[in-house]
Amino acid sequence: MFFKAKKKDNFHSDSPGIVLVKLREKYARAYERYGARFFDKAKLEERINFQRATRSDFQRFVVDEMQFYKTMETKAVEEETKRKRQEEADARMREIMDANDALIAHYPDVFFHPLATLECRRIVGAISNLFPEIENELRYVFQGRREWSEIKFQLADLERFVYKPPMRMTAFLSHYVAELQKWGETGRDDADRKFLQTAAMCLTAITNEIRTTIDGLVDADKVRAAQITARLDAIVADFRLSDWAQHGLSLKAQQRLTLR
């Protein structure tokens, strides 16, 4: 505060010159901490010069300056507190992002478009690398069984994330890029969320289908199927998409029931 609660300045006993020295010292210290936005020393000098020029009541002038100082100090402290909280939140977010980046660093960074974010590029890399192999494995295990039509449908969904260079984006990838171009930075988070959640749903839908049928497979095929689900689960876990996947699939199931 302008004057410490434990020690009040007695302006009646100080000369105007001493009072102004104290006032300027207060402003100088506050300026060093909070800056000119709240404590503009040049503006203070203008007010002092105006008081001298008009020969207004000096005690009234000092009381007004005290009140003004307290008001500005309160605003400055509030903003500093808010800034520190934001900095702490940003630091925590950077830690989370760094941890996430470390988990997905081993996946290829598929640069399918300059606007695509790193997380989306890496999940495209993960799926693009994985897809041909699991498609062949799932075809080997399930083709000829009644579950194959559903798995084949889910594979087609997942294939939307496969990028075949040079510049061969699927319609889904092109739509994501178009959203980024349309909305720019303001729409990036929403576009990324939809993109990653869709990927998570596609990956999890396949593993869910395999798990419901795995008991009916012969032992050798059980091993193949379990290896596939482990690799799909690893991608979902590394990108921390499990909750998004379950939420999205639950909503999708509810919509199907509504349409019936």
Image: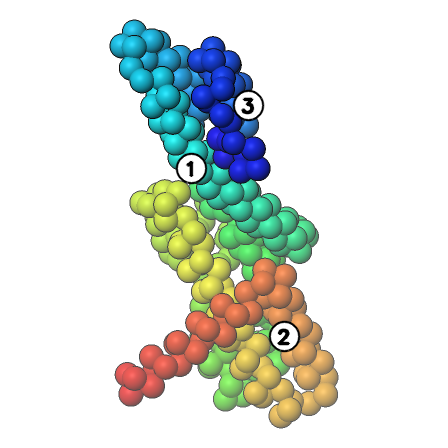
* Front position in the image: 74 or 144: 74
Specify the label residue 75 is tagged with.
1
Q: Earlier in the sequence, mark 2 or mark 3?
A: 3
Badge 2 amino acid? Thr
- The extreme front residue here reads 13
Q: Secondary structure at mark 1?
A: helix
| Residue 198 placement (x, y as % from top left) | 45, 65
| Residue 21 placement (x, y as % from top left) | 51, 14
The residue that appears at 51% across and 86% down in the rendered structure is 147
Q: Earlier in the sequence, mark 3 or mark 1?
A: 3
Eye-nearest disc, 2 or 3: 3
Q: What residue does disc 3 label?
A: 29
Image position of 2 with respect to 114: above or below? above
Q: Earlier in the sequence, mark 2 or mark 1?
A: 1
The residue that appears at 55% across and 27% down in the rendered structure is 33
Q: Spatial distance from mark 3 to mark 1, Cα to Cα?
A: 16 Å
Badge 1 amino acid? Lys
21 to the left or right of 171: right
Q: Secondary structure at mark 3?
A: helix
The answer to whether any part of residue 202 appears in the image is: no
The residue that appears at 45% across and 54% down in the rendered structure is 192
Q: What residue does disc 2 label?
A: 229
